[in-house]
Image (spheres, grey):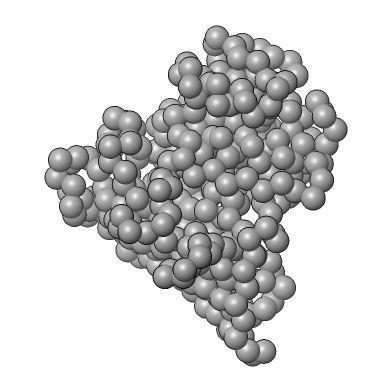
């Protein structure tokens, strides 16, 4: 049965966007399994894995197996000092990600971290200043969009005007807890930052993407531990609402209550209402079908009702675009301000929810 912490979908682009050896990356701190998908998709887009730093033998070998060109180094400093490294990809314990990123930026390299990119607003502000000083990228893998074909297809439909102007986004992000497979830091609030800071950063990022907002006001935020008293610092349920500058709104729910009978790690869905239609993304499973179906997009607009299965048809264009951004100093994959704003709003929601809970 699939678990969320080892979910790492890979989609090869039509063709690599750079020559072999032109864009060398390093991988480090595989504290979350998302790193393997991040690296694999960069390799599929043309990157070369040059170096791996990971103290755990099994994780290091798994990374090294992704590219025969890769070599293991015994210190993170060796990566920072390597002159051929363009970008460092990492999925460290969440509260350590900002500090690692600052070191990468100050070593004149771009940084690509798993979400959540920060666990406090103070970390965000510190990184903002370093980005301004260095001109390097602090990229974030919001995988529930950039590694999901249904979510990316919805973006294309919206950009084409298929449902008119987006009015509301409902984002649902249930996850399987897999309590016996989690490391100790997973249950430490200081380490993971809170459920809205962590899981809900995906939903904030999608709201900004689909509505075209650059900012929003949080109108409600709540977190709780509803069913896991043995782990008092775990937040197993979180929700928030917000309204963007253009009046589009969102409601998002994240939780650790995926039931054991589901064939995948979570029934993540996004529902998008526009002035001339609606979209539902059934990202990871289409419930109660005899065969496994993911990446299903349901669309209704003035032309009728449409069911679209997009697995293998959309790909993950973010990764090719990120390589080109790093090489050409552009912002095609995701702007720096967009990544920071998604993190900022999820952090602000977490602060509001924490205060209300106290």
Q: In this picture, is 56 found above or below 345?
A: above
Quick check: 86 left or right of 201?
A: right
**What residue appears at the point 41 percent right and 52 percent down from the top-left corner?**
265
> Toward which corner of the image does residue 324 lie, by quadrant?
top right
Q: Give the camera-side residue of 61 and 82.
A: 61
In which quarter of the view is residue 66 placed? top right
The answer to whether any part of residue 67 appears in the image is yes
Query: Residue 250 appears at what percent x and percent y?
Result: 44, 68
x and y, in percent, of residue 204 in the image: 48, 57
At x 70%, y 35%, the residue is 43
The residue furthest left is 229
Furthest-right residue in this view: 19
Residue 46 position by quadrant = top right
Is residue 212 shown above or below 55?
Answer: below
Left or right of 319: which side holds 4?
A: left
Q: Residue furthest front?
A: 290
Q: Residue at x 39, y 38 (%)?
A: 120
User: Relative to the observer, which residue lies in front, 134 or 266?
Assistant: 266
Identify the residue at horizontal 55%, vertical 80% (top origin): 278
């Amino acid at each position: 049965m699939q678990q969320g912490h080892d979910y790492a979908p890979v989609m090869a682009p039509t063709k690599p966007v750079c020559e072999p050896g032109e864009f060398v990356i390093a991988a480090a701190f595989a504290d979350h399994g998302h790193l393997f998908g991040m690296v694999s998709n960069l390799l599929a887009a043309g990157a070369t894995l040059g170096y791996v730093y990971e103290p755990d033998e099994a994780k290091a070998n798994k990374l090294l197996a992704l590219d025969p060109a890769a070599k293991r180094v015994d210190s993170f400093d060796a990566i920072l000092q390597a002159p051929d490294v363009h970008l460092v990809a990492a999925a460290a314990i969440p509260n350590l990600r900002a500090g690692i990123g600052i070191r990468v930026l100050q070593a004149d390299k771009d940084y690509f971290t798993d979400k959540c990119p920060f666990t406090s607003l103070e970390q965000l502000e510190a990184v903002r200043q370093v980005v301004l000083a260095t001109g390097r990228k602090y990229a974030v893998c919001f995988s529930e969009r950039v590694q999901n074909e249904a979510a990316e297809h919805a973006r294309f439909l919206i950009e084409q005007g298929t449902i008119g102007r987006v009015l509301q986004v409902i984002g649902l992000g249930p996850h399987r807890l897999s309590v016996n497979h989690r490391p100790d830091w997973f249950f430490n609030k200081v380490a993971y930052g809170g459920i809205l800071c962590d899981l809900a950063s995906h939903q904030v990022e999608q709201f900004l993407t689909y509505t075209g907002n650059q900012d929003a006001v949080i109108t409600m935020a709540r977190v709780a531990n509803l069913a896991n008293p043995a782990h008092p610092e775990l937040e197993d349920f979180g929700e928030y609402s917000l309204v963007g500058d253009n009046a589009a709104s969102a409601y998002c729910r994240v939780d650790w209550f995926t039931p054991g009978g589901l064939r995948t790690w979570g029934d993540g869905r996004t529902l998008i209402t526009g002035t001339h239609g609606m979209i539902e993304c059934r990202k990871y499973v289409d419930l109660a079908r005899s065969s496994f179906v993911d990446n299903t997009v349901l669309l209704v607009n003035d032309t009728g009702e449409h069911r679209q299965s997009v697995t293998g048809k959309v790909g993950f264009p973010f990764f090719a675009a990120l390589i080109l951004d790093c090489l050409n100093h552009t912002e095609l994959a995701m702007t720096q301000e967009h990544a920071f704003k998604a993190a900022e709003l999820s952090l602000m929601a977490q602060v509001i929810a924490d205060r209300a809970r106290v």
